[in-house]
Amino acid sequence: MADTQSVKPATADTRAALARIEALYAGLTPQGTGALREAYADDAYFRDPFNEVRGAAAIERIFSHMFEQLDAPRFVILDRSVDGDTAWLTWDLEYRLKKQQPVRRIHGASQLRFDADGRVCHHRDYWDAAGELYESLPLLGGVLRLVRRRLRAG
């Protein structure tokens, strides 16, 4: 028998908050990272494979840094799910390491929890740093692909 108490109905407020975050990330630019401070609670928690920070200002710095390191990064939202005050997004981050290089892609998912004001208070990103990012780097990628082939069964 399923535990129906663990499933929280999605609210219109959560759906609206998620729509605002989706629009923010889909249109994020180097000049627009300041909008993250308004979308996140002052003490929001953020974690991805490289960062673990608390606070809207620290979260803004992560995305500002992304624009400094990558050429033309762009989030493409693929799917969404809402359960109570929690939402999941699946996405692709398209980017170039340098101008004129081919577009690369990181596929990931974000778990977002919203506070009573509709701001993100918890953001956890899940993506495979080794397979999605490191293997695309010239020297390190070759080594990682070799190790992966040796570890495969069969």
Image (cartoon, grey):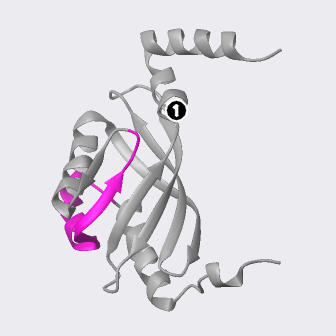
Residue 94 among those drawn in magenta: no
Q: Is residue 22 above or below residue 29?
A: below
Q: Is residue 64 left or right of residue 153?
A: left
Residue at x 72%, y 79% (from the top left corner):
3
- Place of residue 37 in the rendered image (x, y in percent of width and height, measured from the top left): 20, 67
Could you say where residue 148 lies in the image, as x and y percent from the top left?
Answer: 63, 16
Residue in the image at 44% along x and 51% along y: 125
Q: What amino acid is labelled 1 in the image?
A: Glu
Residue at the limit of the structure toward the bottom, as seen here: 12
Going by the image, does 137 lie left or right of 33?
right
- Secondary element at image label 1: helix
Residue 86 drawn above or below residue 9? above
Which quadrant, please, contains the N terminus?
bottom right
Question: Which residue is at a point 53% across and 15% down the rendered structure image?
Answer: 144
In front of the other: 36 or 76: 36
Report the front residue among 120 and 93. 120
Image coordinates of residue 123 in percent, x first then y, are 39, 61
Q: Is residue 35 on the magenta stretch?
A: yes
In the rendered image, the vertical position of residue 79 relative to residue 102, given as above or below: below
Residue 152's image quarter? top right
Read off the residue under disc 1: 132
Vertical placement of 50 versus 152: above or below? below
Locate residue 68: give its quadrant. Answer: top left
Magenta segment:
28-49
